[in-house]
Amino acid sequence: MSETLQTQRPRGSFRGPNIGALAIIFVVLFCAGLYPVTAFGGTPYFPGPAASVDTMVVFFTARSGAVLACAFFQFGSAIVLGLFTVSVVSQLRYLGVKAAGTGIALFGGLLSAFNIMAGTLFLWTMSYPEIAHEEELLHALYRPMFAFGGIGFSVPCGLLFAGISVTSGFYKLLPKWIVIFGLVVAAIGELSWFEMLTPHILALIPLTRFPGFVWLIIAGFALPKMRKQGLAG
């Protein structure tokens, strides 16, 4: 009897950070960075890609403190997203996933984290008053900053969502509705790539970002940490 019980014990749970908690920290830090540069934090608020250079100069001159706060919090969020990515991939592999999806998720998540970090460094540079008063330099810095934080985030993050969703669905690690939710958001993220050709689909970027934030938290807590029970080999 004792030998039978010994062979039927669970193999143990994954030893690593709680990815649901990491997802929450990432979202809180990212949104904390958004708050001061939106209408909630005061006016003028962050200029969109169609704004004139004069509008950009007015914003970055008047709201340098808000810009610095945004860069600070979102730089931190990039670190947490990187930790989430390597942790969720490690957890999937611990649970027995042997598929290319984990590599796709790793590539997408780390690239998203890098692009957020790069964008915030541009933003941090733009928070200096002497930069904000140089119209041509400010405009030259704004474009790559927006690219890193726009499609530079949404497209690779779609790969992160897809990699987790496909492998979790195939190995039945997540409920079907979470898998479908993740695949839908992933598809929107990949379609946001076409924003390079037309600004009319700019809305696909926030449609990837904010539903994706919700999905990361849900999937993070729903993904099991313990292997299924089975007889020892």
Image (cartoon, rainbow, N blue to C red):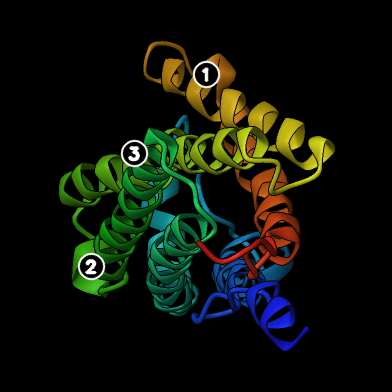
x, y percent for residue 101: 44, 36
The residues tagged by marks 2 and 1 sit, at their Cα atoms, a distance apart of 30 Å
Q: Can residue 2 be seen in this view?
A: yes
Q: Residue 84 carries which label?
A: none
Separation of marks 1 and 3 at Cα, in angstroms: 15 Å
Q: Where's residue 114, x and y in %? A: 28, 56
Q: How far apart are marks 3 and 2 (CA)?
A: 16 Å
Amino acid type shown at disc 1:
Leu
> How many C-alpha atoms fall within 10 Å of the one at disc 3: few (<14), some, or many (≥20)?
some
**Residue at 67 percent of width and 82 percent of height:** 3
Mark in front: 1 vs 3: 1
Element on which disc 3 rests:
helix
Q: Can residue 151 be seen in this view?
A: no
**Residue occupying the point 66% across, 70% down:** 20
Question: Does dot 2 land on a helix, a strand or a loop?
Answer: helix
Q: Mark 1 points at which residue?
A: 191
Which residue position is annotated with label 2?
A: 125
Return the x and y of residue 4 as percentages of the image width and height: 72, 76
Q: Which residue lies furthest to the front in this view?
A: 1
Mark 3 vs mark 2, foreground winner is 3
Instruction: Write down the residue under mark 3.
Output: 147
Q: For the point 27% across and 73% down, which residue is it?
A: 129
Query: Mark 1 vs mark 3: which is more N-terminal?
Result: 3
Q: Using residue 155 as the reference point, say whether residue 36 is left or right of it.
A: right
Q: Is residue 137 above or below residue 70?
A: above
Name above or below for residue 161 compared with residue 224. Answer: above
User: Which of pointers 3 and 2 lies earlier in the amino acid sequence?
Assistant: 2
Residue 105 placed where, x, y %? 42, 44
